[in-house]
Image (tube, rainbow, N blue to C red):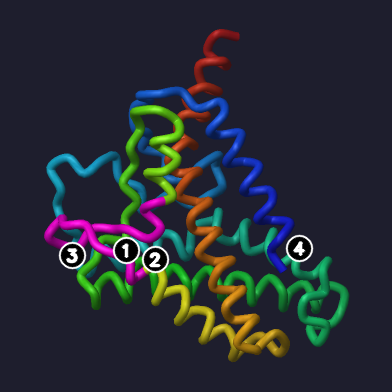
Amino acid sequence: MRRVVCFCLISGIFCAVGFAQEDVPETSNKRIFGIIPNARSSPSLTKYEPLTVKQKFKIAKDDCFDRGTFALAALFGGVSDLQRSNPSFGPGVAGYAKYFGTAYGDFLIGNMMTEGIYPSLLHQDPRYFRSGQGSKMSRLGHSMKQTFWTRNDSGAGQFNYSEVLGNATAVAISNSYYPENRHAGDAVTKLGSQIGIDMAANVLKEFGPDLMHLMTRKREKK
């Protein structure tokens, strides 16, 4: 269902890594390329301070209702519509509305689970901590690792249960509004796809500011 979008994300990642500059200052921009929500990025782990439950849910809320999330849902919904991944949704505008609604539901539930509910219950930090320095490969590894390794509220590193359990819960809930593709194999594929998308998002959060900085400098020279 999401192969085309995943391919675009992966292509964007290679472009970002290829053109990324090193030691670029952290940007306060909460959207990467003006589209991808970036509410939970943090400059670094220096002087680590844990988030309150209220702050965790604010991050989840900001990501859920960001205009970029609606744009991504429209994109994912369009791809699913073209692939007719759920034929019972039907064709035309009415069919696309269902694809868009379910795609947005995936983002909404996934964000709430991985950024608000599970981090609060498990006392984990939902933020992405950007490196911003070092070699491109070390930064790439740093960004991918954070999909599975996070910080608890004490600042210690631990397995990112919130990411895996949160997305697993979201996939289980999605079975209630997807009429097709409800088998165990489909659920595993959806879970892997969602974790892969989150990993790709981490990489873009790491290298996105570099590209934005580079583009800004080019505009200033012109």
Label 2 vs label 3, nearer the camera:
3
Pointer 3: residues within 10 angstroms few (<14), some, or many (20+)?
few
Instruction: Give above or below for 156 relative to 133.
Output: below
Disc 1 to disc 3, how far (Cα)?
A: 10 Å
Disc 2 to disc 3, how far (Cα)?
A: 14 Å
Label 4 vs label 3, nearer the camera:
4
How far across and down, in percent of the image, does residue 97 sit? 73, 74
Disc 4 to disc 1, how far (Cα)?
A: 30 Å
Disc 4 to disc 3, how far (Cα)?
A: 37 Å
Say which amino acid is labelled 2: Lys
Say which amino acid is labelled 4: Val
Residue, disc 2: 61
Q: Nearer the viewer, residue 162 or 87?
A: 162
Residue furthest to the right in view is: 91
Which of the marked residues, 2 or 3, is nearer the chain's N terminus? 3
Residue, disc 4: 79
Q: Residue at x 45, y 40 (%)?
A: 140
Label 1 vs label 3, nearer the camera:
3
Magenta includes 155? yes
